[in-house]
Image (cartoon, rainbow, N blue to C red):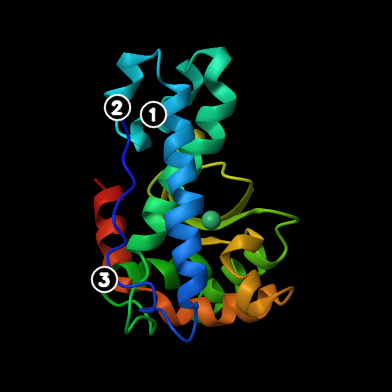
Amino acid sequence: MYQLPALPYGFDALEPHIDARTMEIHHDKHHATYVSKLNDALANHVGLQAKSVDDLLRGFDSVPEEIKGPVRNHGGGHANHSLFWQIMGPDGGGTPSGPLGDALTEAFGSFEAFKEKLTNAAANQFGSGWGWLVVHGGKLDVLALGNQDSPLMQGKTPILGVDVWEHAYYLKYQNRRPDYLAAWWNTIRWDAVEQRFAAAQG
Ligand code: MN
């Protein structure tokens, strides 16, 4: 059975960028529901329950047809939010250094150009979804995906992601998604993203 991971900091840890009430509902209600519904979907699929949620999504093509829908939505939701909590934290923001900083400059021209590209991808995602920084074929790329679709389903490894479902920002920012995105950059724990980048390089 999959379990809701504890938030690695307090609900108010990302204030003023992301408000405590949003964090509480987002983690304790939304993420909890993805986990619960994923478990329901896999109730009769013991072999799949043994996989990590990331491996479940990497192997999405072999998931039985009758549970593909809930695995995509709720498995994706579980994996995406598990990453999201880890790549944010108090005292976040700034810019990455080391190999990731170098790779971002190489792939996008500069850190600022990367930031603009991911911000635009997330801002322009129509309806619910996520903006992603992924590693694919040893290279960095930015993309946006709808709903809870995970880059893992495309064989890509997400190392940074931003949730642009309205539940992620509406209490504080209402319709101002660009304001939420601008604030979100101040929550990023680049050390965590750097670790994911190193792991994705194998
Ligand atoms: Mn969410």
Residue placed at 32% from the left, 35% from the top?
2
Please tell me the numbered disc located at residue 191: 3
Mark 1 crowdedness (10 Å alpha carbons): few <14, some 14-19, many ≥20: many
Picture coordinates of residue 107 (x, y %)? Answer: 48, 64
Q: How many marks?
A: 3
Picture coordinates of residue 67 (x, y %)? Answer: 53, 19
Viewer can see residue 160: no
Side of 65 where 11 appears, left or right: left
Viewer can see residue 102: yes
Picture coordinates of residue 49 (x, y %)? Answer: 32, 23
Alpha carbon of mark 3 to alpha carbon of mark 2: how far?
Answer: 27 Å
**Which residue is under mark 2?**
51
**Which residue is under mark 1?**
56
Residue placed at 68% from the left, 67% from the top?
123
Q: Is mark 1 within 8 Å of ligand 1?
A: no
User: In the rendered view of the protein, which quadrant contains the N terminus?
Assistant: top left
Q: Secondary structure at mark 3?
A: helix
Residue placed at 59% from the left, 75% from the top?
181
